[in-house]
């Protein structure tokens, strides 16, 4: 039981260190991303940093994140479609050309 109680603080320490390094990566990436009307999209941060979306969402909502001067806010709504949102294409299939034998003869 004492081994388990010793592992928990170590794991929390590791998670805090990872969060700090992720936060630094986000802050560095924010300065390189295009800003439109003072807004940066979460998808562009996700593409730039490759940080998992769930972690990125939590870190961007934290109050201690330092934003560049030209960034007023971060748009948290993602435009990435999930598998459930992707539907089959509704394009019509092309008809197969008829073979020469099945064409009616003129004459």
Image (spheres, helix red, strand yellow):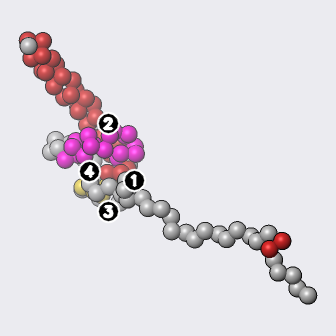
Q: Assign the C terminus to one quadrant of the image.
A: bottom right
Q: Assign the N terminus to one quadrant of the image.
A: top left
**Residue at mark 3:** 37
**Residue at mark 2:** 25
**Residue 7 is drawn in which quadrant?**
top left
Q: CA distance from mark 3 to mark 4?
A: 12 Å
Helix, strand or loop at label 4? It is loop
Helix, strand or loop at label 1? It is loop
4 vs 1, front mark: 1
2 vs 4, front mark: 2
Residue 83 is tagged as 1
3 vs 4, front mark: 3
**Residue 46 is drawn in which quadrant?**
top left
Verify CB contact (< 8 Å) between mark 3 and mark 4.
no
**Is residue 31 shown to the viewer in this render?**
no
Q: CA distance from mark 2 to mark 4?
A: 17 Å
- Left or right side of 23 for 49: right
2 vs 1, front mark: 1
Point out the tag, 2 or 4, that comes first from the N-terminus: 2
Of residue 101 and residue 75, the one placed in the foreground of this image is: 101
Question: Which residue of the protein is positioned furthest toward the bottom in this rendering?
Answer: 107
Helix, strand or loop at label 3? It is loop
Bounds of the magenta segment: 45-61
Give the residue drawn at x 51%, y 68%: 90
**Is residue 83 shown to the viewer in this render?**
yes
């Amino acid at each position: 039981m004492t081994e388990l109680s010793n592992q928990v603080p170590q794991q929390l320490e590791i998670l805090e260190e990872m969060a700090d390094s992720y936060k630094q990566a986000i802050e560095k990436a924010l300065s390189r991303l295009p800003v439109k009307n003072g807004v940066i999209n979460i998808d562009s941060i996700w593409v730039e940093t490759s940080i998992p979306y769930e972690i990125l969402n939590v870190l961007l909502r934290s109050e201690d994140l330092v934003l560049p001067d030209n960034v007023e806010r971060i748009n948290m709504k993602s435009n990435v479609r999930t598998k459930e949102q992707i539907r089959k294409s509704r394009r019509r299939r092309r008809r197969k050309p008829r073979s020469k034998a099945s064409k009616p003869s003129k004459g």
